[in-house]
Amino acid sequence: MPHLNYHHLSYFRMVARTGNLTRAAQQLNVSQSALSTQIRQLEEQLGQALFDRQGRRLVITEAGRIALGYAETIHASGSELLSTFRGGMLQVRQVLRIGAVATLSRNFQESFVEPLLGRGDVTLVLQSGSLPEMLARLAAHSLDLVLSNQRVHADSLHHGQCRRIARQQVSLVGQPRSSAAAPFRFPDDLQGLNLILPSPQSELRAAFDLLCEQHKLRVTALAEVDDMAMVRVLARASAAPAVVPTVVVRDELRDGSLQEYCRLPNLWENFFAIHLKRQYPHPLIEGLFARSDSDLLAI
């Protein structure tokens, strides 16, 4: 079996990192035609297309993502070899790229990646944005996984899977009530309140509106917010209670600056992980999934 050419891998790594043949050629100080030839030779040797050529853009394929992982490891091993003989050591690291919907609870995101924090052999790349933006990056293999509080149906995912990894009952949370106050009664004490509510476009808001309709409740929206981080800020700053899963405000509940008044019946926030079905699954992902709701939500 012919040996892999180290330069081929090095050139491929640079093209994959820049996503542009011209920029990669400039950084490598080689001609664009020579670089293109090197990439084509590597593809022929591997028997796989490493990039989809979309006009002037190069979009890495799944095979390219696998090859890039090996190229990064080989590059790190070369650097480690040099470092070893210069009196130091470098550690080979795995890279996991996770995208999250910008409105998703930061506390949930922290709990999800917590097992990897502090590991010397793992580099986390965390990105956030809209769900369509994150799904586009996932389809282009620039992300390994997307976290969302919105379900994505299989027919809208190309070779993808959306799995619910946790859920939490939604609560009414607000400033601490007087110790002399009677326990909060649902639904009676909810009547007529000013509330911090989820955005009207969210599934959670639709479920809350249905709950109010069923119990003939009239409430006023003091604020309608789609960003859970902002819900957390407003709940701390305002006298108005918030309709929110407690993972969002778990630190405030622990330190007593906020209080859970009641859990709202039949109202749940779901947390989903979206990933592509791959012949070579990322080795770190299944371990992150193999945890209970209480671990992910830090209940």
Image (cartoon, rainbow, N blue to C red):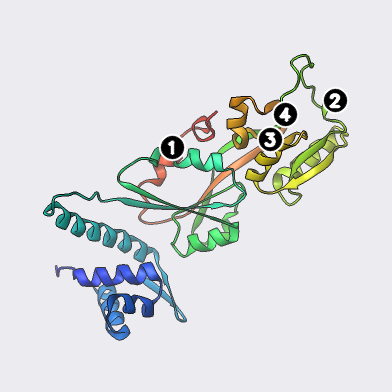
**Residue 195 percent coordinates (x, y):** 79, 38
Mark 3 nearby-residue class (10 Å; few <14, some 14–19, many ≥20): some
Q: Residue at x 29, y 78 (%)?
A: 40
Mark 2 nearby-residue class (10 Å; few <14, some 14–19, many ≥20): few
Q: Nearer the viewer, mark 3 or mark 2?
A: 3
Amino acid carrying mark 3 in the image: Arg
Amino acid carrying mark 2 in the image: Asp
SS state under label 3? helix
Using the numbered discs, state the Cα–Cα distance from disc 3 to disc 4 in whole angstroms: 7 Å
Vertical arrangement, residue 42 with respect to residue 131, above or below: below
SS state under label 4? loop
* For the residues bearing labels 1 and 3, Cβ distance under 8 angstroms: no
Q: Nearer the viewer, mark 1 or mark 3?
A: 3
User: What's the mark number on residue 188?
Assistant: 2
Q: Which residue is mark 1?
A: 290
Residue most extreme to the top: 180
Q: Which residue is mark 3?
A: 236
Using the numbered discs, state the Cα–Cα distance from disc 1 to disc 3 in whole angstroms: 33 Å
Using the numbered discs, state the Cα–Cα distance from disc 3 to disc 2 in whole angstroms: 24 Å
**Residue 184 percent coordinates (x, y):** 77, 22
Q: Is residue 181 left or right of residue 162?
A: right
Q: Which residue is mark 4?
A: 175
